[in-house]
Structures are given as structure tokens and as C-alpha cells.
Image (spheres, rainbow, N blue to C red):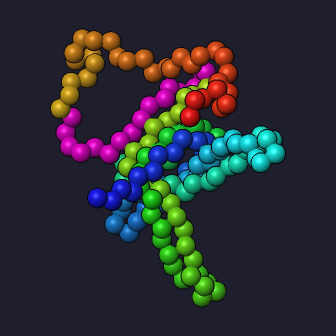
């Protein structure tokens, strides 16, 4: 069995761009920056940023183009795909991107719209909503500990 799965969490480096295919399906592209902190061989703390190209199709492409903005945190889940084409100079060009199956908005700044998620629909909704059940909706906020967690404190 083979597995092609990518999960990233980072900030958008630019506003999403939405286009339509000749078939009418919407396609949205954007880039997400992630970073990692590590120590070099001399023990100095270093930070490295990576940039990931993301592609969304269909209804979730429309949702992302409408609500995501540059600088906003987002979690993306999907598969890695590399495309190739011949450039104007005759040279073969390559682009590796994440074709998203699902994305989730990151935490919002206080006073802005709430966070949420969007996932491809696989059919009609069968689960009754929280209002229909009579139970309260789950909390959208996550409470984080006050103290800073240092990487060297993590046991692995």
C-alpha cells in the first residue's frame, strides 16, 4: 500500500487567486508559509521558512477565495502532486503543489469573523445539527497554556 498525504499549518503568503476551468469548475491557488526552528552545529538557534503551493477545486475553492486573506493561518490536508510543462524558452518546468482535500481556518484575531472548516461533501447531510439535537454547539476557541513551551523541553 502506498500513501500520499500532506498536512501543513501555516500562514498565507498572498491572497488566494480563483479561476475557472473551461468546464466551469472553480480552481483556487495560494501559498502557505511554514517554519521550523532548529539549532545549528554551533548551538545557535536558526529558523527556516518553507513555502507550499496549494490548489483547491470546486465549492471549497470558492469558500477559500471568499474568506482566506494574506497572513491568515490555515491548515491544509491533501496530496502532493508535481506537474510539468514546457516553458516559453523550451525548457521543461516543474511545480510541486498540495491538491487539498480539506482545509480549516486558523484562529482569528479578536473581533474578526470566527474560525471554521470546510471539507468536500460526500453526499447529503445525515447527522442532525446541534440545534436540532437540542445540545449546545461545541466551543470554537481553544485555550492554550500561559507558559511558553521550549523545544528542548519536549522529550523526543
On-image quarter of the N terminus: bottom left
Q: Position of residue 13 (x, y in %)?
A: 64, 48
Determine the residue positioned at 82% across, 45% down: 42
How many numbered dots are placed on residues in this image? 0
Depth check: 16 or 53 in front? 53
Relative horizontal placement of residue 11, taking residue 8 as reference (left or right): right
Relative horizontal placement of residue 36, taking residue 60 as reference (left or right): right
Among the 4 quarters of the image, the one containing residue 86: bottom right
**Residue 64 visible from this viewpoint:** no
Q: Is residue 121 magenta?
A: yes
Determine the residue positioned at 69% across, 41% down: 37
Establish if 80 lies above or below 64.
Answer: below
Establish if 34 lies above or below 109.
Answer: below
Relative horizontal placement of residue 33, taking residue 81 as reference (left or right): right
Span shown in magenta: 110-125
Q: Position of residue 147 (x, y in %)?
A: 66, 16
**Residue 52 visible from this viewpoint:** yes
Q: Is residue 6 magenta?
A: no
Depth check: 110 or 73 in front? 73
Among the 4 quarters of the image, the one containing residue 110: top right
What secondary structure is the magenta-colored segment mainly? loop
On-image quarter of the C terminus: top right
Q: Farthest residue to the bottom: give it.
A: 90
Among the 4 quarters of the image, the one containing residue 9: top right
Determine the residue positioned at 49% across, 36% down: 105
Q: Position of residue 117 (x, y in %)?
A: 42, 35
Relative horizontal placement of residue 51, taking residue 126 as reference (left or right): right
Q: Position of residue 75 (x, y in %)?
A: 50, 40
Depth check: 28 or 47 in front? 47
Determine the residue positioned at 65% across, 44% down: 35
Amino acid at each position: 500500500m502506498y500513501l500520499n498525504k500532506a498536512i501543513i499549518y501555516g500562514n498565507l503568503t498572498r491572497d488566494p487567486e480563483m479561476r475557472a476551468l473551461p468546464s466551469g469548475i472553480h480552481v483556487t491557488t495560494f501559498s502557505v508559509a511554514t517554519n521550523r526552528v532548529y539549532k545549528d552545529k554551533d548551538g545557535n538557534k536558526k529558523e527556516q521558512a518553507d513555502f507550499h503551493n496549494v490548489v483547491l477545486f470546486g465549492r471549497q475553492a470558492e469558500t477559500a477565495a471568499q474568506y482566506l486573506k494574506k497572513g491568515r493561518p490555515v491548515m491544509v490536508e491533501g496530496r502532493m502532486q508535481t506537474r510539468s510543462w514546457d516553458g516559453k524558452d523550451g525548457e521543461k518546468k516543474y511545480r510541486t503543489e498540495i491538491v487539498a482535500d480539506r482545509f480549516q481556518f486558523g484562529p482569528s484575531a479578536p473581533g474578526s469573523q470566527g474560525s471554521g472548516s470546510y471539507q468536500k461533501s460526500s453526499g447529503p447531510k445525515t447527522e442532525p445539527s446541534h440545534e436540532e439535537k437540542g445540545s449546545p454547539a461545541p466551543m470554537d476557541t481553544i485555550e492554550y497554556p500561559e507558559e511558553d513551551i521550549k523545544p528542548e523541553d519536549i522529550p523526543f
